[in-house]
Structures are given as structure tokens and as C-alpha cells.
Image: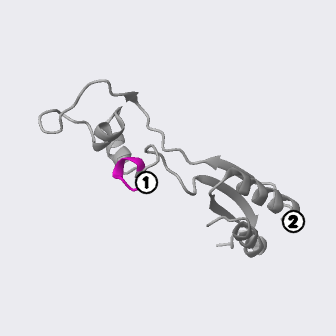
Amino acid sequence: MKPAKEQAILAYFKSPDDAQVASERLTDELDIEDVQIDRISGGQPGEGNDRFMNPITANIPSHASLVNATDPSSISTGILLGSSPAVSGMTDGSMNTISGRDILLTVIVPTERVECALQIINECGGQH
């Protein structure tokens, strides 16, 4: 098997501005073109739940139904929604959303430039 010529790096940032600076540096200094910035969202799929549910007497589709008033489309969706930090209680409490490092920078780097790319990401405040 041949060794890989490229490697993907996923880096997390606290602000879009920091990620943009890292993206520009990666593009300018390392001549990398494959860079993308996205926000990680804690959005919940499905229709909102408009009925009152008593956890003792009602048929509850999932834990997410109680916490975020969602109505999952299937049992599997309900299980996955229950693992969200916004549902599980693992967020910092700011409106049931994911906060902190919610900006994702994805970059494809030639293997010989991975260390340089990681150094730029670290200097710009990213974690990988």
C-alpha cells in the first residue's frame, strides 16, 4: 500500500475571525487551497413539540423531547439527539447551545507540510 500524499486536519476555534486568520495563513504561507470553515450547530431536526408531556405518565419519544421540545422522526434520531451536549447537560448553560470551540476549520495538507500547518493552527488559537 502506498503512503498517503495528503492528510486532513480538523481544527476547532472559538471565533470565526481566528479561523479566518488561520485559513489565510495556510493559503498564503503553505500554498494550500483546500480549506473550509464551518460552524458546528446544536440545532435539532424534526418538528417542535407543542404538547405537554409528563415524564411519569406520557409516552416520551426521547430525552431530547423533554429537554429541547423536539419531536424526533424515529427512535434512532431520538437516541442520537439525546447524546447532544445541549440535551445531556454538558454545555455551559448558554441557551442550550454548544459554545466554546464551535468553529471547525477543515484543511487538506500535503503530508510533508502537516507539522507547519499544525503550528499555524496553534498560533492562531486553534485546537486539533
Q: How many marks?
A: 2
Residues in magenta, as a range: 86-92
Q: Secondary structure at mark 1?
A: loop
**What residue is drawn where x is 40% and y is 31%?**
46
87 part of magenta stretch: yes
Q: Residue 110 at x, y = what percent? A: 77, 67
**What residue is drawn where x is 13% and y is 39%?**
56
In the rendered view of the protein, which quadrant contains the C terminus?
bottom right
Query: Does 21 sit above or below residue 127?
Result: above
The one of 93 and 114 positioned closer to us in this rendering: 93
Q: Which residue is mark 2?
A: 29
Q: Residue 85 at x, y = what percent? A: 41, 52
Dot 2 amino acid type: Glu
- Left or right: 68 in relation to 11: left
Residue neighbourhood size for the residue with mark 2, other residues' Cα within 10 Å, grouped as few (<14), some (14–19), many (≥20): few
Residue 76 placement: quadrant:
top left
Residue 126 placement: quadrant:
bottom right
Label 1 to label 2: alpha-carbon separation: 36 Å
Q: Residue 82 at x, y = what percent? A: 34, 47
Contact (Cβ within 8 Å) of mark 1 with mark 2: no
Residue neighbourhood size for the residue with mark 1, other residues' Cα within 10 Å, grouped as few (<14), some (14–19), many (≥20): some
Q: Which residue is mark 1?
A: 91
**What residue is drawn where x is 56% and y is 48%?**
40
Residue 104 numbered mark, or none: none
Dot 1 amino acid type: Thr
- Left or right: 92 in relation to 17: left
**What residue is drawn where x is 63% and y is 54%?**
104
89 part of magenta stretch: yes
The one of 42 and 73 positioned closer to us in this rendering: 42
Q: Residue 8 at x, y = what percent? A: 66, 62
